[in-house]
Image (cartoon, rainbow, N blue to C red):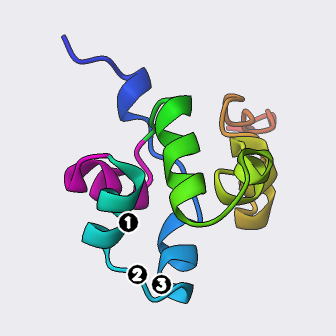
Amino acid sequence: MENNRSRTIRKNRVREIRENRLMTQAQLARKAKVALRTIHSVEKGMNCRMDTKRKILLALGLRFEDKDHVFPQPSSFASDEGRGDPSMPPPSAPSTPHSF
């Protein structure tokens, strides 16, 4: 059985910041001391451990306190997409009486 929590997809700004610093994924992985596939996964939006986020932030020249800027919480970017809080169930359709 697959662990759904570790496979959660979330938006982050790692790729954007890495590219602004003219770094390759391999360079970031080496500097952060994580596997290249970890950088691939993180940039695709896969969830990762807090320690991995810390390593990536420091390798990008950022402080750990910048984590919410680079790895926003779901509710902070969901409103940008017009979908509301993704942890909440979708609103139910209004019930309208049917006349037959």
Q: Main secondary structure of the magenta part?
A: helix
Side of 100 relative to 52 (left or right) = right
Side of 54 relative to 39 (left or right) = right
Find the magenta span and give its range. Answer: 34-46
Asked if disc 1 and disc 2 are in contact, CB closer than 8 Å, the reply is yes
Which residue is denoted by mark 1 in the rendering? 28
| Label at residue 23 | 2
Residue found at x 63% / y 66% = 61
Marks 2 and 3, how far apart in space? 6 Å
Which residue is denoted by mark 3 in the rendering? 19
* Mark nearer the N terminus (1 vs 3): 3
In the image, is residue 88 part of the stretch drawn in magenta?
no
| Label at residue 5 | none
Asked if disc 2 and disc 3 are in contact, CB closer than 8 Å, the reply is yes
Q: Amino acid at mark 3?
A: Glu
Q: Amino acid at mark 1?
A: Leu
